[in-house]
């Protein structure tokens, strides 16, 4: 499957008040690995640090060919891991 046919899960990870950059990098990497292991190859995951906020939020792109169930699965998995890191 080519990337153009995949769903893109973009996680925006706020690092504004993070004092320990090593710990923050480890958290982001752990978050990426956990989400990646929870999904199949039809989803491509990106984590983007955001220096202007402390929020962690997500966005799903390329949803034209995705079923409502698949999108809901992504939302549930994303919310689960976001709650774990708070």
Image (tube, helix red, strand yellow):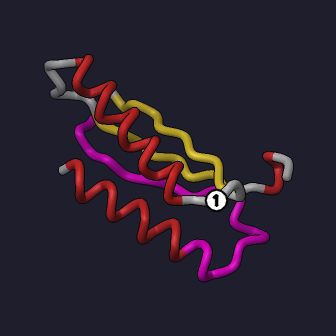
- Name the residue at 37% across, 52% down: 57
Residue receiving disc 1: 40
Q: In which image quadrant can residue 19 be found?
A: top left
In the current view of this chain or complex, which residue is farthest to the front? Answer: 37
- Name the residue at 30% across, 55% down: 82
Q: Where does residue 18 sit, x and y in percent of width and height?
A: 18, 26
32 and 14: which is toward the camera = 32
Query: Label 1 crowding class (10 Å Cα cut-off): few <14, some 14-19, many 20+?
Result: few
> Magenta stretch containing residue 57, yes or no?
yes
Residue 10 placement, left or right of 21: right
Q: Where does residue 62 sit, x and y in percent of width and height?
A: 71, 58
> Magenta stretch containing residue 53, yes or no?
yes
The relative height of residue 8 versus residue 48 in the rendered view (above or below) is below
Q: Where does residue 52 sit, x and y in percent of width and height?
A: 30, 30
- Name the residue at 31% across, 28% down: 26
The local secondary structure at tag 1 comes to: loop
62 and 33: which is toward the camera = 33
Q: In which image quadrant can residue 78 be found?
A: bottom left
Number of numbered discs visible in the structure rendering: 1
Residue 23 placement, left or right of 44: left
Residue 68 placement, left or right of 47: right
Q: Where does residue 9 sit, x and y in percent of width and height?
A: 56, 52
**Which residues, given as a range, are shown in magenta?**
52-71
- Name the residue at 17% across, 19% down: 20
């Amino acid at each position: 499957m080519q990337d153009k046919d995949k769903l893109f899960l973009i996680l925006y990870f706020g690092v504004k008040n993070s004092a320990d950059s090593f710990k923050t990098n480890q958290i982001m990497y752990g978050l990426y690995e956990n989400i990646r292991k929870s999904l199949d190859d039809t989803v491509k995951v990106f984590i983007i640090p955001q220096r202007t906020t402390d929020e962690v939020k997500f966005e799903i792109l390329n949803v034209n060919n995705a079923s409502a169930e698949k999108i809901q699965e992504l939302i549930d998995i994303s919310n689960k891991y976001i709650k774990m890191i708070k």
